[in-house]
């Protein structure tokens, strides 16, 4: 009887002990999430849209969805264009100008992809989406962003 009581006491204690490091790791992940800059958030929205576009841009059955993804990516690019990274790695004036120029080019490419879809030119739209991936890679190389 006594042993059973001891075990009943030990089980929750053991569970609590195991739970501690898990919670600590969890907290770390959450605080990282809260630390993400508005620029990071805008880029993530662009990244999600581009990933889906890569999969479906040449599928005529998904044209409405592709148009919607392009519009979402364009809005996020407009947002990103007005932002900067977190203050600890502030950019010089030249870097800011280069950043905005590259994002403007991304917006022009999105416009071209939208135009191609409007004309039913799915192959052309696919090429423009490939351009977006190239522009992303070049921008990330320039700004030393680890690619996702
Ligand atoms: C064209 C489409 C683009 C897409 C889909 C895209 C996507 C992304 C994604 C997903 C991230 C987050 C990476 C991570 O989690 O570590 C990111 C970060 C970043 N991207 Fe882009 N990107 C694009 C274009 C560009 C361009 C052209 C530039 C530069 C002119 C650029 C500069 C940056 C910078 C500086 C960060 C780091 C932001 C921060 O964490 O504060 N990106 N991008």
Image: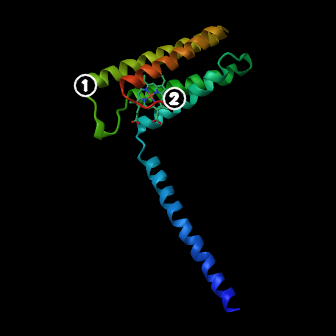
Q: Residues within 10 Å of mark 1 (few under 14, many from 20)?
A: few
Which residue: 41% across, 35% down? Answer: 39
Q: Is mark 2 within 8 Å of ligand 1?
A: yes
Residue 11 x, y percent position in the rendering: 63, 76
Which residue: 61% across, 23% down? Answer: 53
Q: Residue furthest bottom?
A: 2
**Foreground of the two, 44 or 12:** 12
Residue 104 x, y percent position in the rendering: 41, 18
Instruction: Give the answer, above or below, for where 108 lies relative to 39.
Output: above
Identify the residue under disc 1: 93
Q: Is mark 1 within 8 Å of ligand 1?
A: no
Q: Write down which quadrant ligand 1 falls in.
A: top left
**Foreground of the two, 71 or 147:** 147
Residue 5 x, y percent position in the rendering: 66, 87
Residue 143 x, y percent position in the rendering: 36, 27
Q: Earlier in the sequence, mark 1 or mark 2?
A: 2
Q: Residues within 10 Å of mark 2 (few under 14, many from 20)?
A: many
Q: Residue 114: which quarter of the image?
A: top right
Identify the residue under disc 2: 46
The alpha-carbon separation of the residues under discs 1 and 2 comes to: 24 Å
Element on which disc 1 rests: helix
Element on which disc 2 rests: helix
């Amino acid at each position: 009887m006594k042993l059973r009581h001891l075990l009943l006491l030990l089980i929750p204690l053991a569970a609590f002990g195991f739970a501690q490091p898990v919670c600590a790791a969890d907290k770390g992940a959450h605080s990282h999430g809260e630390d993400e800059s508005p620029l990071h958030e805008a880029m993530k929205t662009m990244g999600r849209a581009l990933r889906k576009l890569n999969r479906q841009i040449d599928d005529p059955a998904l044209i409405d969805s592709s148009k919607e993804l392009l519009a979402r990516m364009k809005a996020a690019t407009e947002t990103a264009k007005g932002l900067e990274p977190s203050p600890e790695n502030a950019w010089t004036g030249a870097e800011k100008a280069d950043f905005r120029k590259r994002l403007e080019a991304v917006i022009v490419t999105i416009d071209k992809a939208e135009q191609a879809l409007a004309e039913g030119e799915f192959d052309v739209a696919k090429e423009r989406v490939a351009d977006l991936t190239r522009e992303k890679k070049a921008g990330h190389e320039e700004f030393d962003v680890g690619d996702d």
